[in-house]
Amino acid sequence: MKKMKLIFLTFFVGIMTNSALFAASEEGAHQLPETYMVIPFIVLLLMIATGPLFYEHFWEHHYPKVSIVLGIITVLYYIFQLNDVHSLIHTSAEYISFIALLGSLFVASGSIYIKVDKKATPWLNVVILFIGAVLANVIGTTGASMLLIRPFIKINKNRIRAYQIIFFIFLVSNIGGALTPIGDPPLFIGFLKGVDFFWFVQNIWHIWLPTIIFLLIIFYIIDSRNKDDAENQDNYSGKIEVKGAKNVIYLVIILISVFIDPNVISWVPSFEPIPIGIREIIMFAVMYLAYKNADDEVLMANEFDFEPIKEVAYLFVGIFATMIPALQLIAHEAHVMGSELNAGVFYWATGILSGFLDNTPTFMNFLSAAMGKFGFDINSTAQVLTLENQHAIYLEAISVGAVFFGALSYIGNGPNFMVKSITERSGIKMPSFFAYMIKYSIPILIPTFLIIWAIFYLGAG
């Protein structure tokens, strides 16, 4: 409970500080940052990649300080050099929304215990991964990941391997959530800008389904070669047990609160310049109540603690801050070159950058560039609808790139790091940042994404 109070206190101080800065600033044109200001972001990514591998003791004890210090460098540059507090306020609002959603889903799902009393087999794992991919569109990639990762680990307790967790990240934490605005934050932003709620499932399912099946076939082939570490004499009842099911109501409240936004419902109040809204207040309240009212037996069975969400909160506060210059420079170049970009370029550019930058602002930047290519204004709902109706291939390419490529690295999407942290706390050794890409995401995902490009986007646009 002390850690939880500390998290809430940190957010409160950040909100008040940003509000004071906003009040002291004046509206003005935003100057582009110097290119060298991407260095703090690059340094942070390199330290995330190399810290656990080469200086584990230092990293384990000091990663919060490293993340915050690098973030402060960027913040000070924007305040004193660019006199641009608005970008900081905007980013802090995105960060608070990000942590509110991840934190509330983490606690609510951690208060639910699922036990599948069946023998682990490749077919059972395939079924779980497919269910998780579908479920990601209903409760989000974060909700599905947090709900299923612990049962998935326990089912495979005698045959658990890192590749199983990595395919879980591929399918449940990322690619699965490509069919609805609830599935992944970039698509929700598209919905807020005017894209029809059901457009994604209608236009992406024919890419989503073959990709899911293809990756499940690869997983099945690999998993079929995996044997139990020990002779398992357990008798399996075949039952599925759910404890703490009452906490499903918290998941429902979180999902409903996602839509409590002034951009969706006109009567919802905005608290600007404070970078928090009714939605985030509800999510933090759910986070507190779900933990306070959780069954101790369920928390113990799930080996629940706040370390995974604390790690995500500290690392991503640095990532969100230091990536501001990178995103602004990318946005500028995307708009300058927008008329020269085809659907395939939008697919790869959105995708690769989403693998290492936050995919929501990356989606927004390239959606804006695609709108500009045709002389449309991203702030016009009618013109967004025109893009989705007359130039759907561009919206499709940007959406697929933003969601699918989030699986390229541990930092590509918030749930990735949480799944990794929960897995490691269960005693399972996960590959390093670079090993994840070299051994898994590059040899498995890049050929998959090349096939998607060749079939759907080569020469399109």
Image (tube, rainbow, N blue to C red):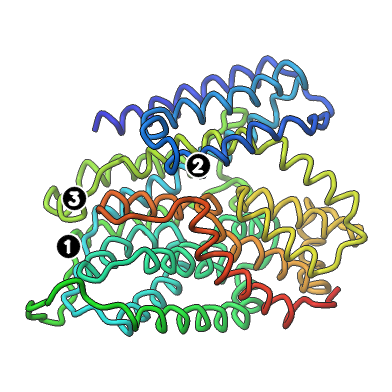
Count residues near mark 3 (Cα–Cα under 10 Å), then give few for <14, some for 14-19, many for 20+.
some
Q: State how far apart marks 3 and 2 are (Cα).
A: 32 Å
What residue is pinned by disc 1?
243
* Image position, residue 431 (x, y; %): 42, 55
Mark in front: 3 vs 2: 2
360 relative to 82, above or below? below
What residue is pinned by disc 2?
50
Q: Earlier in the sequence, mark 3 or mark 1?
A: 1
Position of residue 258 in the picture relative to residue 332 (left or right): left
| Residue 8: quadrant of the picture | top left
Which residue occupies 80% across, 77% down?
458
301 relative to 114, above or below? above
Kind of residue at disc 1: Lys
Position of residue 126 in the picture relative to residue 403 (left or right): left
Evaluate if marks 3 and 2 touch, with contact meaning CB atoms under 8 Å apart.
Answer: no
Which residue occupies 57% across, 60% down?
408
Which residue occupies 51% across, 31% down?
67
| Residue 28: quadrant of the picture | top right
* Image position, residue 208 (x, y; %): 57, 77
Q: Which of the two residues, 261 or 9, is positioned nearer the viewer here?
A: 9
Which residue occupies 37% across, 47% down?
104
What residue is pinned by disc 3?
299
Q: Judging from the image, what secondary structure is the residue with disc 2 in? A: helix
Q: Judging from the image, what secondary structure is the residue with disc 1 in? A: strand
Q: Which of the two residues, 69 or 222, is positioned nearer the viewer here?
A: 222
Mark in front: 1 vs 2: 2
Kind of residue at disc 2: Thr
